[in-house]
Amino acid sequence: MDLGMAVERAMILALQGADREKIQSLLIEAADGLRASGVRILGVVEHLPPGCAHEDVLLLDLVSGETNRLHQNLGPGASGCSLDPAGLAAASAGVERAIAARLDEGGDLSDTVVILSKFGRQEAEGRGLTSAFHAAVAAEICVLTSVSPTVRDQWDGFVGDLAQIAPASLREVEAWWNCLTRELAE
């Protein structure tokens, strides 16, 4: 994926090193902070209400506010994967529509960040939010995400030199964005 971007800092920042709840909260906090500084935010994050059950996790669209169920209730005693492929596909399609709408507006895209909740097993297998990742990169829009350590090798193969891994902290996100905006302005 050659973007022709001559920046020293990777266009994708992937966070690791904290539990799911902390990382998703950090992504929401980063979205709020970036938005407050004038950055246009697209994407989805996991919405984890306090005390929610595993099957109650939702994917929250950061543009429309719509939610899609991330897990399905398979019933008592079920042992299969509970991910809801329809919910995940709908969330990914929503992000792709937001990216297309942003492209239709035209203008400089350096004021836009796509936040994608996670690159996990589904994405490592080419499903889940994979098409949203592709759409963001094809549009040359910066991406903020997280990566499950269990799929780190697949992540490295998926993104090549377009991404960097950083500890899950708001300071790391701010440093990444500040560096990118300086480099893109030059």
Image (cartoon, grey):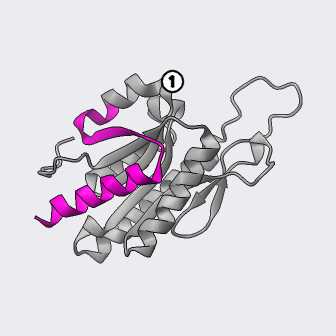
Residue drawn at the location 45% of the way across and 55% of the way down: 115
The residue positioned 46% from the left and 26% from the top of the image is 151
Q: Which residues are magenta?
A: 158-186
Residue visible at 74% across and 54% down in the picture: 49
Residue 56 magenta? no
| Above or below for 64 versus 96 | below
Question: On screen, 185 above or below 8?
Answer: below
Left or right relative to 77: residue 152: left
Residue at label 1?
150
Residue 90 in view in this figure:
no
Residue 71, given in percent of the width and then of the height, sits at: 70, 42
Counting from the top left corner in percent of width and height, residue 78 is at 82, 26
The main secondary structure of the magenta stretch is helix
Left or right of residue 111, residue 58 in this image:
right
How many C-alpha atoms fall within 10 Å of the one at disc 1: few (<14), some, or many (≥20)? few
Task: State which quarter of the image contains the N terminus.
Answer: top left
- Residue 72 occupies which quadrant of the picture? top right
Specify whether residue 47 is in view. Answer: yes
Magenta includes 160?
Answer: yes
